[in-house]
Amino acid sequence: MLNMYISRNMCPQFDQEIAAETLKLQQIQEKYSMYTAPQKYVPPTAEEQKEIDSRSVHMSNVDWNSTVAEIEKFFYGCGEIKRVTIPKDKFTGRQKNFAFIEFDSPKSASMALLMDKSEFRNRFVTVVAKRTNKPGMNASKVGGPRYGKNQVVVKYVYVNAPAPGRYSKRFTPY
């Protein structure tokens, strides 16, 4: 009967081939893992965000059916455009009527500011410098320290109003 299992001590050349193949496979996996693995988004620091905002503009009153290519064509003479963003409504999927344009340099952004009050797709658009978004600006917290989390604010009290319902009377405990 043939011995099907060969011990490792008997074939050192076989062990070397396996080690070489394993090393080669690991190198290939490392090379392609950066293409297939999802990259985690790292938000820019405050300084980087200010630098990005210094070379970006906000364009409002944009037509609902505008495309990124049309906006790039509109700002073609201002300088090289790095990115155009047209936000969309997350519930309807319809684009909002404003856009952000990020240029390659702050000089290009200042050139784009000259396009304010110009006509784009039969609408007069407003082009202003993009402001840096500050955290907490869109908070829905009401008031100051007087309004707690569990407090109810009553605006109107109808004392002598008729009770709701057709024939019901107001509850009088005495």
Image (cartoon, grey):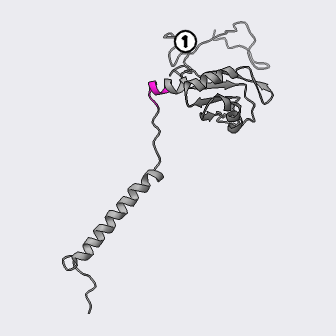
- Front one among 105 and 8: 105
| Residue at left offset 67%, top offset 35% | 72
Q: Is residue 150 magenta?
A: no
**Secondary structure of residue under mark 1:** loop
- Front one among 159 and 106: 106
In the picture, residue 9 is in which quadrant? Answer: bottom left
| Residue at left offset 58%, top offset 30% | 103
- Relative image position of residue 26 (x, y in whole percent): 35, 60
In the picture, residue 59 is in which quadrant? Answer: top right
The residue tagged 1 is 143
Q: Is residue 38 left or right of residue 167?
A: left
Highlighted range, magenta: 44-49
Q: Is residue 45 magenta?
A: yes
| Residue at left offset 47%, top offset 47% | 38
- Relative image position of residue 12 (x, y in whole percent): 21, 75
Report the amino acid beneath label 1.
Gly
